[in-house]
Image (cartoon, grey):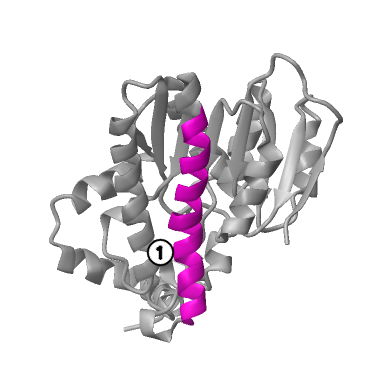
Amino acid sequence: MATSASTTPGKTVGRPYAVVTGASSGIGFELARLCANDGFDLMLSADRPLDSAAQDLGSTGARVDVVETDLATREGVDAVIGEVGERQVDALIANAGHGLGKGFLDQDFDDVEHVIDTNITGTLYLIHELARRMRDRGGGRILITGSIAGFMPGSFQAVYNGTKAFIDSFAEALRNELKDTGITVTCLMPGPTDTEFFERANLMDTKVGADKHKMDPAEVAAIGYRAMMDGEADVVAGIKNKLEVAMAKVTPASLLAEQHRKLAEPGTAKAEGKKTTGSKARRDGKDG
């Protein structure tokens, strides 16, 4: 069931308008903040409450509309499109998405479908509807959140990585199709980022989920926002992630899958903790 609200009545004349999905927290919220600080009015959507985000971003002077809905459903996306109404969308930031941990055969298939429908189907439907409007008027910016996960077979995150491989590829193809229309399409490809993603995906007992050195979502958002405003095709957030992508392009898929297993298999956080403790004990002369 979608709910919608507006922080202020009426539409501010002369301000550009940005639609941001997955905007309740993390990268999406930070992207929305950058838009607000740059003079955009906002339409925020997520499957979690948006009141706090709307209040925070409204303090910048932006008009902030919100739609709390499930973007994995046709009805959820229609609710967003309905809230946009006839307004001109200058920037579409398709950031909504979520992951799913554990082995594929141990996952509930309803959860599998929800990941696919959020990350791919709902994302494409929203882009299809709003980008047509952009094409009709001859301009607009689209930022799609992909992932470096799309460059590697994701053992114990097989569905998520597969959806991001699709999105990374789709964004590049759509950009080419729209190259003469005045619309730019940019794909932001983060690596592990310090958001609620890992908790929601049931990955906190994995090495990647427990890692304390994830990127700051504000930093990732700034990289993506600059790339969108500059009209770049794609951007990988962070030097370490750039190196991982470069290595993934020349590494056999079977080896990448085994490497991913060591990061995402349930229980690897505990195994890493034992390894670290043992190494420290040896350094302190307490073992061996």
Q: Give how far across and how far down residue 164 sits, in percent.
A: 37, 55
Q: Residues within 10 Å of mark 1 (few under 14, many from 20)?
A: many
**Which residue is at the front of the view, 125 or 219?**
125
Q: Position of residue 145 (x, y in %)?
A: 45, 45
Confirm whether the magenta stretch covers residue 226: no
Quadrant of the drawing holding the N terminus: bottom right
**181 or 229: nearer the eye?**
181
Residue range corresponding to the magenta coloring: 108-133
Percent x, y of residue 238: 39, 40
The residue labelled by disc 1 is 160
Q: Is residue 3 visible?
A: yes
Q: Which residue occupies 16% across, 69% down?
A: 254
Q: Quadrant of residue 170?
A: top left
The correct choice, above or below, for 281 with respect to 55 in the image is: below
Which percent across, then down, holds residue 159? 38, 68
Please indicate, yes or no, whether residue 140 appears anywhere in the rendered image.
Answer: no
